[in-house]
Image (spheres, rainbow, N blue to C red):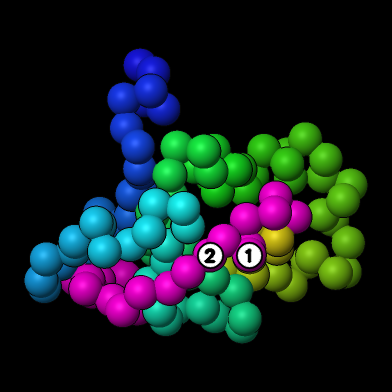
Amino acid sequence: HNLLDKYDRFVVTRSDHYYGCDHDLSQLDNDFVWVPIGEDYKDGITDRYVLANRATILRVLNIFPEIVSHPDKFFSPEFSSLNPEQLIRFRWEHEGIWPWVRRFDRVMFTCAVSGDTTRW
């Protein structure tokens, strides 16, 4: 569908995020990868939202292909205890994305309806 040609920026977020106020993307510099402040468990980076431009989005999302392609690199004591947030940060550091990550104040929160099952 040539999405990289159609869009300048990509937002990857959770379907259960509720935005309590406007989320003005024009206030966030297009040269950076944007992630909301918080939910950075054990020095990782939140897996709940990312805003990236077309030049970086594929590297931002390139978390699991490297693990599947080279499992020998990741099945070691160093990696066995990583949580998802730590794994994302590790991959972004190795993809050269980490210096481009910037943070913004949250305008969203996670929500559920009565009867939803969740661990949070």
Q: Residue at x 55, y 48 (%)?
A: 60
Q: Specify the segment rendered in magenta.
A: 94-120
Query: Considering depth in this image, is 44 or 95 the residue closer to the camera?
Result: 95
Tell me where residue 94 appears, x and y as whole percent: 75, 55
Q: Is residue 115 magenta?
A: yes
Q: Is residue 53 magenta?
A: no
Tell me where residue 27 appears, x and y as whole percent: 26, 64
Tell me which amino acid carries mark 1. Pro
Q: Which residue is mark 1?
A: 99
Quarter where residue 107 is shown: bottom left
**From where the camera sits, is residue 113 visible?**
no
Q: Residue at x 49, y 42 (%)?
A: 57
Callout 1: 10 Å neighbours few (<14), some, many (20+)?
few
Q: Residue at x 89, y 47 (%)?
A: 72
Above or below, 83 against 54 in this view is below
Q: Which residue is mark 2?
A: 101
Callout 2: 10 Å neighbours few (<14), some, many (20+)?
some
What secondary structure is found at the residue carrying circle 1? helix
Q: What label does residue 4 carry, if any?
A: none
The image quadrant where one finds the N terminus is top left
